[in-house]
């Protein structure tokens, strides 16, 4: 399987981290002194490695100088391993992982993930790659799968080539760097979730990232495979330094055990003399068996702290590195040959054998030739060798490493040994598994034992508690026993007492019977008395009724009297019934009131009489004055009559004068005419005497014409005068009517005001009444609640009383039954009865006391209830009156409106007449005759009475002005 194995040492690289913050603050010394690329001096001693990285080396430099080559090797089919060894916080994780997603600070693992794929993409396209990754950690020698948290204790097995591997470990196929990173992230997350203190955990566990690369040439079908282990080891410090103790110390020892196993393996390999290498001491060394002195190219990073504080750890780490440096590995390509290749190899070997055989034969012949002896064929060593070689030729070459053994032992033996070894290893593996199982079982049992211990402790505590309880209970039961004894004694005493008492009770019973008989007799007499009482009550009720009637009559008379005497201020309750005394007192009060009223009346009467006398006196005086006035009036009337007569005569005279003036003016006109004709005749006579007749005619015609004209004029004048007189009369008439209407209007207005004031007072009254009504309702409800509570309390008291009586009777009965015969007990019984009777009396008193205010309240309530409908009736009547008044008011308003309209119409009519007259008399005055009221909308007028009346006033005023203007 292996091809061209090459021996090489493990590469050891030393890396120092810089001083950290706390070390600087502490003032630690910086120990290492770097000499060249590969040497470091610490504490005067120099250590040489394949490479020493000083503190300022970048991640990239580290990767390029060492890890890059390993990736190439793995892709060529070699196995590879990178370890990081060192104390905690020396930079192992920083070197292996770094900051996973930071391109500058990322460590070897993420760079490898990227690099692998870069190489693959640059390689022959006929190559097919299968890349699997696994991620697990070893803690306390248990393998935990970081990609499947359920796998916590995996075992190590060997494959057919006896190469150890972790059995059942999760393998993820990846096809890109990102997928690899995802797997790492997932594993790291799982690791974080599983533990509480990550720093502590990571310093005590080894984490291993495995990359398995298989490649196949598509055409030649040649297969190569390489494994790359990337191991971040646990901290190499000593346990004492961490200050661990107890369980933690055990754990630390266990961790150190695996690390010391690694140290032992390395020491054994470094010495090179020991035949046994203790790979099987721990799972880690077992897994990394190939990496340490096997078929692997191994690189180990020795991480160191530069601080003087970590001096010893640094030195031991450096020593470890020195030892590891001496280990030699034999790395070979893991090549799987194809059938063709096998065949060719076989032919080649066969050819080799043939030549070898030939040389051997040649040598033999040479030997015979030298010794001259004939050695029999079977004794010749060469022939043995030849046969052995032949036998080797016959079997297929399986492993190149075993060829040296084949030479020394026979084939059968070898096979037998191999078989045995395989079997033994198989057994070892099985035993491993078994040990694992047993370990798990032991763990489980330990846990169970712990649980059981806890349970035992708790049950022991419980037992103690129960014991204490038991003691307490026993004490209690003793007490109880003593008590029971006492109780029994008491019971005995009670029984004796009971016997005595029962005898007493029997006696009492007999006495009771006697008393009961007496009681029945008394009851009978009581009944009779009650019957009599009821009769008496009836009689008294009738009498009362009669008295009430009489009183009613009296009251009525009194009220009538009061209504006559007083001015309605004093009022009496109309219905009289019930408490007569109260009524009497009321009546008395009433009468006293009436008395005082009558007294005041009499006083007033006297005053009035005095006033009357005075009035009479005054009236006589006024009569006298009146008669004198009448005389004066008659004189004035006579005077007026004479004056009017005089006026008429003056008028007539004026008429006559006018007529004479008319006649005179006529005459004047005649004379003027005559004058004219004379001048005319004179002219004509001067002209000639002919045409005398014509002249006479001319004179006669104008005279006749003037006469007729004048007569007409006179007639017309007289008619007009008459007409003027007539009109004047009409105007006077209208003025009279107008004033009358005004008066009416004023009256109506006064009525309206009065009604309005009445209305307002009524509404006020209504409000008051409604307020009273509300208050009344409220008090009614309050009273109802009060009544209910009182009734309930009464009921409970009643019940209590009943119960008490029942209890009493039953007790009495019992006592009478129990003590039938005891003369001494009768006295005590009597006392008891008297005491109980007293109690009963007190109770009834209390009951009455309780009842008294209640009764008063109830009475008050009833009175109020009686008064309620009356008040309601009054309220209703008031409301009705208010309504009636409102309707009356409305009617009055309507009437006023009607009057107003009529008045307006009248005024319109007069105005029209006036206008007509004016038109006749003064045509120029027509333009004044516009009436502003006519433009006013009637609806406004009806709706706004006040406004309307105002407008009305102004209109009237305007009209009067017009009339005066017209006249
Ligand atoms: P370990 O894994 O050995 O316990 P870490 O790798 O966790 O230690 O390193 C401890 C601290 O030191 C980390 O904070 C890390 O960043 C820092 N550190 C380690 N090596 C270097 C270095 N070469 N350069 C800078 N810082 C470093
Ligand atoms: Mg770490």
Image (cartoon, grey):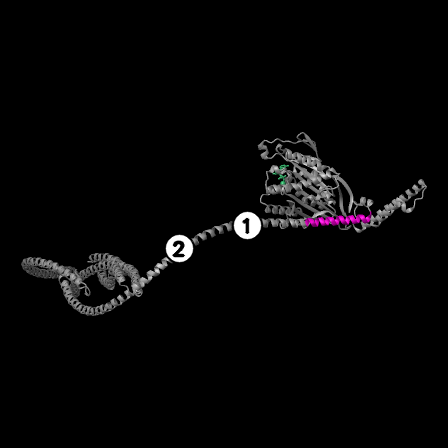
Residue holding disc 2: 483
Q: Which contiguous range is marked in magenta?
A: 410-433
Which one is in front, 878 or 135? 135
- Kindly identify which numbered label has been placed on residue 456: 1
- For residue 749, what is the image quadrant? bottom left
Which one is in front, 24 or 625? 24
- For residue 277, what is the image quadrant? top right
Please report the residue visible at 47 percent of the width from the left and 52 percent of the height from the top: 470
Q: How far apart are the two marked residues, 2 and 1, measured between alpha carbons?
A: 39 Å
Residue 929 appears in the picture as rendered: no
Q: Does the magenta stretch include residue 426?
A: yes
Q: Is residue 759 left or right of residue 610?
A: right
Quadrant housing the C terminus? bottom left
Q: What element carries label 1?
A: helix
Image location (x, y in percent) of residue 13: 69, 37
Indicate which quadrant contains ligand 2. Answer: top right
Q: What element carries label 2?
A: helix
Magenta part, dominant SS = helix
Q: Would you place residue 293 above or below residue 843 in this image?
A: above
């Amino acid at each position: 399987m292996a091809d061209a194995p090459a021996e090489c040492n493990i590469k050891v690289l030393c890396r120092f981290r810089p001083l950290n913050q706390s070390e600087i603050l502490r003032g630690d010394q910086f120990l290492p002194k770097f000499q060249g690329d590969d040497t470091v001096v610490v504490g005067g001693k120099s250590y040489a490695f394949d490479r020493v990285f000083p503190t300022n080396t970048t991640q990239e430099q580290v990767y390029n100088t060492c890890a890059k080559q390993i990736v190439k090797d793995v892709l060529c089919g070699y196995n590879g391993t990178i370890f990081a060894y060192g104390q905690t916080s020396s930079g192992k994780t920083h070197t292996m992982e770094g900051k996973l997603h930071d391109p500058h600070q990322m460590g070897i693992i993420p760079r490898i993930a990227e690099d692998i794929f870069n190489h693959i993409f640059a390689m022959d396209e006929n190559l097919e790659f299968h890349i699997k990754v696994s991620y697990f950690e070893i803690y306390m020698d248990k393998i935990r799968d970081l990609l499947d948290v359920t796998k916590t204790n995996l075992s190590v097995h060997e494959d057919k080539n006896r190469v150890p591997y972790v059995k059942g470990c999760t393998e993820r196929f990846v096809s890109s760097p990102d997928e690899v990173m995802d797997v790492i992230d997932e594993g790291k997350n799982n690791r974080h979730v599983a533990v509480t203190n990550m720093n502590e955990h990571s310093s005590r566990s080894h984490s291993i990232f495995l990359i398995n690369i298989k490649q196949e040439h598509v055409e030649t079908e040649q297969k190569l495979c390489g494994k790359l282990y990337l191991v971040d080891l646990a901290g190499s410090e000593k346990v004492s330094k961490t200050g661990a103790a107890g369980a933690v110390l055990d754990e630390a020892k266990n961790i150190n055990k695996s690390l010391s196993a690694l140290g032992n393996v390395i020491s054994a390999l470094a010495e090179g003399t020991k035949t046994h290498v203790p790979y099987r001491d721990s799972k880690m060394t077992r897994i990394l068996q190939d990496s340490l002195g096997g078929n692997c190219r191994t690189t180990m990073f020795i991480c160191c702290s530069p601080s003087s504080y970590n001096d010893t750890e640094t030195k031991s780490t450096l020593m470890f590195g020195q030892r590891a440096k001496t280990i030699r590995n034999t790395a070979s390509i893991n090549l799987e040959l194809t059938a063709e290749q096998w065949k060719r190899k076989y032919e080649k070997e066969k050819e080799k054998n043939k030549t070898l055989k030939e040389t051997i034969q040649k040598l033999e012949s040479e030997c015979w030739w030298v010794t001259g002896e004939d050695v029999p064929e079977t004794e010749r060593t060469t022939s043995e060798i030849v046969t052995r070689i032949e036998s080797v030729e016959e079997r297929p070459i399986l492993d190149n490493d075993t060829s040296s053994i084949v030479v020394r032992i026979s084939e059968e033996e070898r096979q037998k040994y191999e078989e045995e070894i395989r079997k033994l290893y198989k057994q070892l593996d099985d035993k491993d598994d078994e040990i694992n199982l047993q370990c798990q079982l032991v763990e489980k049992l330990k846990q169970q034992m712990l649980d059981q211990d806890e349970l035992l402790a708790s049950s022991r505590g419980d037992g103690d508690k129960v014991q204490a309880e038991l003691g307490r209970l026993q004490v209690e039961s003793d007490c109880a026993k003593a008590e029971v004894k006492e109780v029994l004694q008491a019971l005995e005493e009670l029984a004796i007492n009971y016997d005595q008492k029962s005898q007493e009770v029997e006696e009492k019973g007999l006495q009771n019977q006697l008393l009961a008989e007496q009681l029945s007799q008394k009851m009978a007499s009581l009944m009779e008395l009650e019957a009599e009482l009821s009769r008496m009550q009836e009689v008294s009720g009738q009498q009362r009724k009669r008295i009430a009637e009489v009183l009613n009559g009296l009251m009525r008379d009194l009220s009538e009297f009061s209504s006559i005497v007083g001015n309605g201020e004093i009022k009496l309750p109309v219905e009289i019934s019930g408490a007569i005394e109260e009524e009497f007192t009321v009546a008395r009060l009433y009468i006293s009131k009436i008395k005082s009223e009558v007294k005041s009346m009499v006083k007033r009467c006297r005053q009035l009489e005095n006033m009357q006398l005075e009035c009479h006196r005054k009236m006589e005086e006024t009569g006298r004055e009146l008669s004198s006035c009448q005389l004066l009036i008659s004189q004035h009337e006579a005077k007026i009559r004479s004056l009017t007569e005089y006026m008429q005569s003056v008028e007539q005279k004026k008429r006559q004068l006018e007529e004479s003036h008319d006649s005179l003016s006529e005459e004047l006109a005649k004379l003027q005419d005559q004058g004219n004709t004379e001048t005319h005749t004179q002219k004509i006579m001067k002209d000639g005497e002919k045409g005398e007749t014509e002249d006479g005619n001319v004179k006669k015609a104008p005279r006749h014409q003037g006469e007729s004209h004048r007569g007409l004029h006179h007639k017309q004048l007289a008619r007009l005068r008459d007409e003027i007189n007539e009109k004047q009369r009409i105007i006077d008439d209208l003025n009279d009517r107008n004033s009358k209407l005004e008066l009416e209007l004023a009256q109506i207005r006064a009525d309206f005001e009065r009604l309005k004031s009445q209305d307002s007072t009524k509404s006020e009254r209504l409000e008051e009444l409604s307020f009273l009504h509300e208050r009344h309702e409220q008090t009614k409800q309050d009273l109802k609640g009060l009544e209910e509570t009182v009734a309930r309390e009464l009921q409970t008291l009643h019940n209590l009383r009943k119960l008490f009586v029942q209890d009493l009777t039953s007790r009495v009965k019992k006592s009478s039954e129990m003590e039938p015969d005891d003369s001494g007990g009768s006295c005590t019984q009597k006392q008891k009865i008297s005491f109980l009777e007293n109690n009963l009396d007190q109770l009834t008193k209390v009951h009455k006391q309780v009842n008294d205010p209640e009764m008063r309240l109830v009475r008050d309530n009833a009175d109020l209830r009686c008064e309620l409908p009356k008040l309601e009736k009054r309220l209703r009547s008031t409301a009705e009156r208010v309504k009636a008044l409102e309707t009356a008011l409305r009617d009055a308003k309507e009437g006023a409106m009607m009057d107003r309209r009529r008045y307006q119409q009248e005024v319109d009519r007069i105005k029209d007449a006036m206008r007509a007259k004016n038109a006749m008399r003064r045509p120029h005055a027509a333009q004044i005759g516009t009436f502003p009221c006519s433009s006013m909308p009637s609806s406004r007028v009806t709706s706004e009475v006040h406004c309307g009346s105002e407008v009305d006033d102004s209109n009237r005023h305007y009209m009067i002005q017009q009339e005066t203007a017209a006249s």
